[in-house]
Structure formats: structure tokens, C-alpha cells
Image (spheres, grey):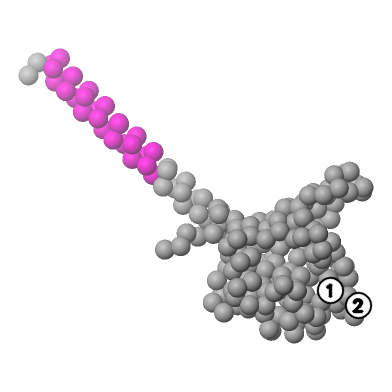
Amino acid sequence: MTEKSRGLKLGTMALGLVLLLSGSTVWAQGAGSDDWREVEKESKRLRRDEIADQALQKLLASSIKADTLYEKAYGWAAFRTVKAAFVFSGGGGNGVAVDKETGERFYMKMATAGVGFGIGGQSYDLIFLFQDKGSFYNFVENGWQADAGAQAVAGAEGANAQTTFTNGIAIYQLTKGGLMASADIAGTKYWKNKKLNKPVD
């Protein structure tokens, strides 16, 4: 074998090795990217769990009536909402719905839009209690939109305190100051967060 042909052969082998290593690096980076995305998703799930659990505990500590309904409820959900207004108002948020019987958690999103006359924003929590399995899974799987008469009512001592389920659901609103006596939630939509829910085996 001449020096030239030997050099060509070595060059071809070296090129093949470089391509092989490059391919392995790309594959490793791709796998690492997938792993990182899953870590990021899990971090978001844990954060939503923490916010939801804290909101529920705050509600139950604030209202004996809510605590009584919670004991009767099949499941519950909590959403952290951020709402802003500048002529047109709108808001959005994230939350989690929990099956009390199985402990399974379903991550969800929400959005609302309407007409407002203020400037500014506010953050609050909405807590849902579901009377039975049907109302819980209808909310989770099919989503839900609050109709024109939907309100979140509470108040530790108020006359408007939520004492029963309405169409299978009881809704409470918590602000930094505590339970709201009445809050209009008409037009608010809730649906499953496809990115955060783990695929069913």
C-alpha cells in the first residue's frame, strides 16, 4: 500500500470516527434535553401542588362550613389566579384537581376575560369542592366554564357563606385578606394542562 493510499484510508477512518462521535454527542444532548424538560415539568407540578395544598389548608382553617363540605366532598381543586384590568379585564392561572379517594392529581389551566373599569391587578386563589365522582371527573376531563350566575361565595360568618353544593360544586375565593364574601367568576374557563399531566399507561 502506497503512502498516499494509506493516508487516504487513515483519513477516511478518522472522518468516520469523528462522525460517530458527533452522532453520539447529539444523541446524548437530545437525551439530556428530554431529561431536563421532565425535571422542569416535575418542578412545575410540585410548585402547583404546594400552592394548592396551602390554599386548601387556609380555606379549611378559615371556615368551619367549608371544612364540613370538604369532608363530604369526593374531590377538590385549587387555582392561583392573576387578574388585571385596564378597560378590558382578563386573567389566567394554573391549578390542580385532586381525587381524594385515590390521591391522583390532575394539572389544569384557567382563563377569564371581561370588561373592567379599573387599572391594576390582583392575585387570589379559587378552591373548588366536588360533591361526587361524576362532578369531579366531568370538570377534569371535559373542562368547565362558569355561567353568568356563577359566583365564588364564602365568608366565615357572612350570610352568603357556602353551605351546600350547587350543581355538584362549591366554590370559594381566597385573597391575601382572607375569604371573599362574594366574587363573580362568570366567563372563566378551566381545562386540562396537556403538557403537565403524565400520559396514561
Q: Which residue is mark 2?
A: 158
Identity, as a three-letter code, of the amino acid under mark 1: Ala
Residue under the image location 68 percent in, 58 percent down: 190
119 above or below 130?
Answer: above
User: Is residue 159 toward the left or the right of residue 79 in the image?
Assistant: right
Front-lying residue, 158 or 30: 158
- Label 2: state its secondary structure: loop
Whole-angstrom CA distance, mark 1 to mark 2, is: 7 Å
Q: Quadrant of residue 127?
A: bottom right
Q: Which residue is mark 1?
A: 154
Q: Quadrant of residue 80?
A: bottom right
Q: Position of residue 1 (x, y in %)?
A: 7, 19
- Look at the numbered discs 1 and 2 and tell me whether their residues touch, using CB distance below 8 Å: yes
Question: Magenta part of the protein: which range?
Answer: 3-28
User: Is the stretch drawn in magenta largely helix, strand or loop?
Assistant: helix
Q: Is residue 77 visible?
A: yes
Q: Position of residue 6 (x, y in %)?
A: 14, 20
